[in-house]
Amino acid sequence: MIKKFMLLGAVALSLATNAQDSKRGFYLKAGGSYFVQTVGTEFPVVSGLAATNETTLVTVGSTGVSSSLVSKESITGSFGEGSRTNLVGGFRFSERLGVEMGVHYYMSASKTMAERHVSIKTPVSSIGDFDAVVSGKIRALDLSPSVVLYLGEVGKFEPYTKVGVILPVFGDLTIKSTTKSTIPAPYALNPAFSKYKNSERTDVVKPNPTIGFVASVGTSYKIAPKLSAYAEIEYRNFTVHGKTKETTGYMVEGVDQLSNLPYSESHTNYVNQLNGTSNNSETNPTGFDSTRPKDELSSYVGISGIGLSLGMRYNF
C-alpha cells in the first residue's frame, strides 16, 4: 500500500513539474504604444526665449515708438506624449517569474516651448504683426530590462505585472524656431523694427547618459497554443539633461544664413556651472572665444507619461 501511495505521489509530482515546465521558455513580443504626459514642468530657455507666452503692443506715435506688455503666462509641459514601437524578447523561468528585454523607438508629439506675439500700430491704424513660436520634438531609442511576475491564468487570460529600468541608446531633441512678420517694407526698414524678420531655425540637442524607471500591468489572451495577444498599461518616469546643441538650419527672409552664424552661436556645450573660465560672454567677457562652442547652463526636459501598449506574443 505504501509503495502505491509513493508511486501515486511521484506521478502527481511529475505532472506538476511538467505543467510548470510547459510555461518555461523564450517568447517574442511586437507591438505599439501611445503615451500621454503625466507631469508637466516649465520648459528651459530656448533660442534666447524664456518658456512663456507673451503678447506685446508696440505703438508708433509722433514722439517715437513705445511698447507695453499686454499679457504673459508660463508654458509648462513635457515630452511624455507620443507613440512608440516595441520589440521585446523574454524568458519565463517558471509559472510565476520571467524576465524581458525591450527595444523601443519613441517619437514624442511636438510641444510648444515659447511664444511671442507683437502687434504694431499707430494711434489710428494697425501696421502689422510679428509672431515667434518655438516648438520641440524628441525621438529616442532605448532598452528596458525588466522582471515579470505572472499572476495566474483565468481562462484564456493571464494577467501580469513588471518593473524595470530605461536605458537610452540614442536620442535627441529637435527645436524649431519660426518667426513671421507682416510689417510692410517702409516700417520694416526702420531700425526699431529691424529685428522683426521672417526666419526659420533648427537646433538639435544631444543628451547626457541617463536612466529611467518603468512599471506596467497587463494581460495576455491566448489565441492559439503558441500565439497570444497582449495589452499593457505602462508608466514611465524619465528626464533628459542636455549635453550639446548644434544649429543645423537657419533661414532669414528665405536666404540660408547658417554659414554666417559665429561658431559659438551655432554650437553649445551644456555645463553645470558658469564661471570666469567658461566660454561665455557674460561670465568671461575678456576670454570669450567665438570660434569655440559657447558654454551654457544645463537644463532638463521630462519624458514621463502613462500609456497603453497593444501587440502580439509568440512562445517558442
Image (spheres, rainbow, N blue to C red):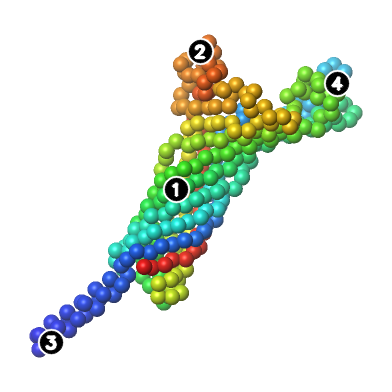
| Residue occupying the far top of the picture | 286
Q: Nearer the viewer, mark 3 or mark 1?
A: 1
Measured from the top left, where is residue 296 in percent x and y? Answer: 52, 25
Quick one: label 3 or label 2, which is nearer the N terminus? Answer: 3
Quick one: label 1 or label 4, which is nearer the N terminus? Answer: 4
The residue at which mark 2 appears reads as 287
Q: Nearer the viewer, residue 36 or 99?
A: 99
Quick one: label 3 or label 1, which is nearer the N terminus? Answer: 3
Q: Nearer the viewer, residue 223 or 274?
A: 223
Quick one: label 1 or label 2, which is nearer the N terminus? Answer: 1
Q: Nearer the viewer, mark 1 or mark 4?
A: 1
Q: Nearer the viewer, mark 3 or mark 4?
A: 3
Mark 3, residues whose alpha carbon is within 10 Å: few (<14), some, or many (≥20)? few
The residue at which mark 4 appears reads as 61
Q: Amino acid at mark 2?
A: Gly
- Which residue is depicted at the point 62% across and 28% down? 48
Q: Amino acid at mark 1?
A: Asp
Question: Distance of mark 3 from mark 1, alpha carbons?
Answer: 57 Å
Question: Distance of mark 2 from mark 4, alpha carbons?
Answer: 43 Å
- Disc marking residue 4: 3
Query: Do we see residue 242 in this rendering?
Result: yes
| Residue occupying the far right of the picture | 124
